[in-house]
Structures are given as structure tokens and as C-alpha cells.
Amino acid sequence: MNPTRILPDLQCSLLCEEIRQEVTGNFFLVGVINFIRVPQVPVVALKLSLFNRWTAGVGQFTETARLVAPDQTTVLRKGEVKFTLQDPALHATNVTVFTQVEFKTAGTYHVEVLVDDVMKLRYPVAVIVAPPQQHPQAQPPPAPAS
């Protein structure tokens, strides 16, 4: 008996500064984001890239990726990607690019990843305001004793 549809597992989801693909098909993830440190808010991120990899499924699916504000209801960005898995041993890699994302306040934002409207993963991304450190003026070295 061959299954006609198995909901896939989300193997990984990583928020990055940039994602590149080599000619071999392998991916380069640049600047995997733990948190976003900014000198002030509001601030605009020109580009955030989301790398999602699916496996162990069979069928046609729709991935929905959302970036949600700290109020837990405002969706700042949303992307949808259709993909197919023909065998549970295969995988599908989806990249969603969020552009011109405005972070109006510091706080905990969330990335949500769904497949066919089923939540598979939700994880926090903190936006932290940390003003640049003021470096004290360097004193010139003392003149050599003669």
C-alpha cells in the first residue's frame, strides 16, 4: 500500500541575513540570526531570509512563513511557497525573503512556520536596543624619557 499523502516534518528553520546557492545546489547560510541588535527603534531591516527544509512527507503542500510582532497578532511579513515531496526519503528546501521589515519596538518577535495551515514551529527572535558604545578618546602615549 502506497500512501498518497503524508504531512512532512520540518527538519530545520533558520533565520539568516542571506542565503546563497552554489552551482552544486548546496546552500550557504550567511549570518544565522540569534537576535537582532539595533542602536535604536524604529529600524528597518533591508532583508531577512528564512531557510526551511522539509522531509518525510508525500504529496503537494503549501508552506506559510510569518514574522509576527511582539503583540502576538500583527503579522509583519508573510510568505507562501508550494512544494511537492514524491517520496518520504526526499527533502524540499524553501527560502522565503522578507524585505523592508520595520521593527517599531524592541521586544520578542516570532517566526511561525506552517504547512497546509498546521503549525509546525514557532520560535522567538529578540530585537534588542543597544546603543553603540562610546569609546573614550585615546590618550597619546607618554613621551620617552631622555
Image (tube, grey):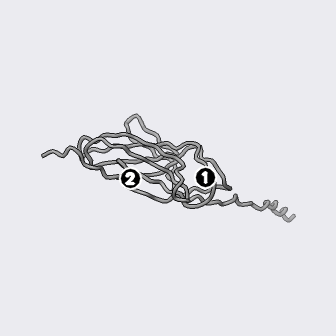
* Residue found at the very far right of the displayed protein: 146
Residue at 30% across, 49% down: 8
- Please state the total of marks drawn on the protein image: 2
What residue is disc 1 on? 103
Q: Name the residue tied to disc 2.
A: 12
Task: Give the amino acid at mark 2.
Answer: Cys
Left or right of 136 on screen, residue 88: left
Q: In the rendered image of this protein, does residue 47 appear above or below residue 141?
A: above
Q: Amino acid at mark 1?
A: Phe
Residue 87 percent location from the top left of the image: 23, 43
In front of the other: 127 or 76: 76
* Residue drawn at 57 percent across, 55 percent down: 36
Residue sitting nearer the eye, 93 or 145? 93
Q: Position of residue 134 (x, y in %)?
A: 74, 60
Foreground pick, 69 / 40: 69
Quadrant into which the C terminus falls: bottom right
Side (left or right) of 62 relative to 43: left
Place residue 85 in its image quadrant. Answer: top left
Decide if residue 135 is on the left or right side of residue 68.
right
Seen at 48% across and 46% down, the residue is: 78
Residue found farthest to the front: 73
Q: Report if residue 34 is visible in the image.
A: no
